[in-house]
């Protein structure tokens, strides 16, 4: 297999988006809890956020016209790669603490790896991001590893 990953693309490994701070409101927790059919009272009253609440909290809110064919906003940490079709490759979560109303969370996202592999139907590129979420005081909340597959 010819090398799909140029030196320029590989130089992107380690790049990060600027940190993003998000203040958690009770109302946001309640809305999320109702929409995801939570049953525990602590979630429905907004006293504590369900674990997956924080996973999408750092996603940008963009106009529909700015979404790509996959329904996501244009990724900022992606070099120009020769393969263009993007598929979900998996997500891993490591939760450290619960989230409460009033918490100010700081998200840092970085490109952690680019790997090429040969699949049954052709070449693949695995793009892996690491997303760290901490409180404003630096207390770990969530570590997330997100992989996208290009073919």
Image: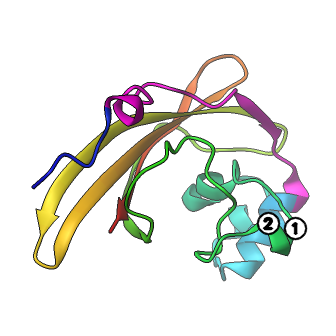
Q: Residue at x 63, y 31 (%)?
A: 17
Lateral position of residue 59 relative to residue 6, left or right = right
CB within 8 Å, label 2 to label 1: yes
Q: Is residue 137 magenta?
A: no
Residue 41 in view, yes or no: yes
Q: Which residues are magenta?
A: 7-27
Lateral position of residue 40 relative to residue 13, left or right = right
Residue 31 in the image: state x and y as whole percent: 83, 70
Q: Residue at x 69, y 61 (%)?
A: 73
| SS category of the residue bearing label 1 | loop
Q: Give the number of the disc on residue 63.
A: 1
Residue 3 in the image: state x and y as whole percent: 19, 46
Q: How is the image coloured?
A: rainbow
| Residue 107, placed above or below residue 59 | above
In the picture, residue 59 is in which quadrant? bottom right
The residue beneath circle 2 is: 66
Quadrant (top left, top right, bottom left, bottom right) of the C terminus: bottom left
In the picture, residue 139 is in which quadrant? top right
Residue 44 in view, yes or no: no
Q: Give the number of the disc on residue 21.
A: none
């Amino acid at each position: 297999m010819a090398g799909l990953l140029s030196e320029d693309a590989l130089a992107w490994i380690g790049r990060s988006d600027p940190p993003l701070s998000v203040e958690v409101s009770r109302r946001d927790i309640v809305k999320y809890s109702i929409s995801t059919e939570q049953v525990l009272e602590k979630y429905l009253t907004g006293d504590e956020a369900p674990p997956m609440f924080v996973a999408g909290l750092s996603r940008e809110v963009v106009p529909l016209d700015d979404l790509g064919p996959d329904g996501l906003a244009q990724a900022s940490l992606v070099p120009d790669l020769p393969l263009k079709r993007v598929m979900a490759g998996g997500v891993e979560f490591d939760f450290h603490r619960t989230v409460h109303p009033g918490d100010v969370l700081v998200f840092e996202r970085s490109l952690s790896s680019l790997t090429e592999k040969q699949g049954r139907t052709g070449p693949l590129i695995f793009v892996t991001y690491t997303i760290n979420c901490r409180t404003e005081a630096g207390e770990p909340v969530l570590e997330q590893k997100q992989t996208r597959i290009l073919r």
